[in-house]
Amino acid sequence: MIKKLLIANRGEIALRIIRACREMGIRSVAVYSQADADSMHVRLADEAYCIGKPRSNESYLKIDQIIAAAEVAGVDAIHPGYGFLAENAHFNEVCRASGFEFIGPSPQAMEKLGDKNTARKMAIANDVPVVPGSEGLVESNEDAIAAAAKVGYPVLIKATAGGGGKGMRVAESEETLATAFSQARTEAEAAFGNGGCYIERYVGSPRHIEVQVIADTHGNVCHLFERDCSVQRRHQKLIEEAPSPSLPEHRRAAICEAAVRMIRGAEYSNAATVEFIVDAENNFYFIEVNARIQVEHPVSEMITGIDLIKEQIRVASGEKLSFSQDEIECRGVSIECRINAENPEKNFQPNPGKIQSIFIPGGLGVRFDSHVYAGYTVPAYYDSMIGKLIVHRPTREEAIATMRRALHELQVEGISTTAAFHDKVLQHPEFVDGLHDTKFVEREFVD
């Protein structure tokens, strides 16, 4: 059994993992940069070690510093959270080689699924639908033209590495293909050190639907139903909900079963999210696998009652899943709003600074996962998210009403947040009717 665990992360996810450890009787070890010395995860962990300067490449991305802290603390395992090194197969290998259990999949599974082109081939092999596209990486303009002609315009050029919308370009015709292909490769090389790209048919105005899956090392694989993450801005998720308001029951079953096939075929263990795009006819196509816990995991927890962080730790300890698929029920509706320190009135400009005061909403069905407090200074060095406001109610109508009430109650003085923007989204008829797609924010709210 794991008795002491280091969290190689910061912010709300570090605090989330510390809470799970405390309830499981596991001692927690925090690491922090100089900028995070006063962060709540540092205060609440059983031990904490400074691992470097404020910038992430001098702290949270320093593998040697994290391993040194783990050795000094004498931990049994390391949880990477999300972001930073969470999907870094080399870090995974180093942790295990240093004698620490890694709370996540094997390095081999992580590496295979981290490459989108390889993952696409694995999806095809496991009878998981993919968007029609090139058979492999496209190496030249001539190959790109040939692949696009076969697929049909418009096409999407996608980087095989990374994410977050980087290395992605749409080409409407052969005349624009060469420029888009060059731009995608250049951006991918700069962002990920890998300029490899492939081509897919462009699916216009899709919904982004993903399935939460968890697997143990004994061959058991279960899904926790799907999440709709279609409310996005520049490929960054803003609002997530579970279950999807737009999927018919038979398509829900099909997409969840496809996600389980994908994970089982990859010989994967621990938590994962299998992401899909869904077109207007409810045809779904595989995008990628996120080999880690995700920001939006709480909505899956709320509708199933399963603590995913605890389950991750149990799986890494060699235990079987504590439930079977038949025992997992989808109860009610959960919605999550990412509260960022940004100013929507100024093109979502980051707004770091000191929080003078904060009132955290409560009441039936309200949860706020956050690491901030009155007097806390939001650093300028990291992601701008200061918390996740989550609600869970019996119906979607009630969930929207409760979320709007909670957003109104959330009062943060000293910095700008996205709370008021979320309230605008929740009132929009397209969202209320569950008809929104990934272009909804760009189409209805001036970007």
Image (cartoon, rainbow, N blue to C red):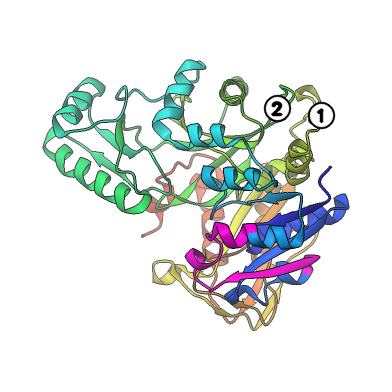
Q: What residue type is labelled 2?
A: Cys
The answer to whether residue 440 is left or right of residue 424 is left
Q: Helix or strand or loop: what does disc 1 sit on?
A: loop
Image spot of residue 116 (x, y percent): 42, 34
Residue at image coords 17%, 24%? 146
Q: How many marks?
A: 2
- Residue 53 within the segment the image draws in magenta: yes
Three-letter residue code for mark 1: Phe
The percent coordinates of residue 352 (x first, y second) are: 52, 76
Circle 2 SS class: strand
Magenta-highlighted residues: 44-67
Q: Residue shown at 30%/38% (left/top)? A: 196
Q: Tell me the quarter of the image containing the C terminus.
A: bottom left
Mark 2 crowd level (few <14, some 14–19, many ≥20, 10 Å Cα): many
- Residue where numbered disc 1 is placed: 323
Front residue (pair 2, 283): 2
Q: How crowded is mark 1: few (under 14 residues within 10 Å), some or many (20 or more)?
A: few
In the image, 355 versus 127, the foreground residue is 127
Instruction: Give yes or no for residue 374 being in the magenta stretch.
Output: no
Foreground: 138 or 228? 138
Res. 430 in view: yes
Q: In which quarter of the image is residue 7?
A: bottom right
Q: What residue is shown at x 15% (from left), y 34% (from top)?
A: 141
Residue 276: percent from left, percent from top = 49, 32
Q: In this view, does 317 lie to the left or right of 25?
A: left
Q: Are marks 2 and 1 in contact (CB under 8 Å)?
A: yes
Can you see residue 245? no
Residue under numbered circle 2: 222
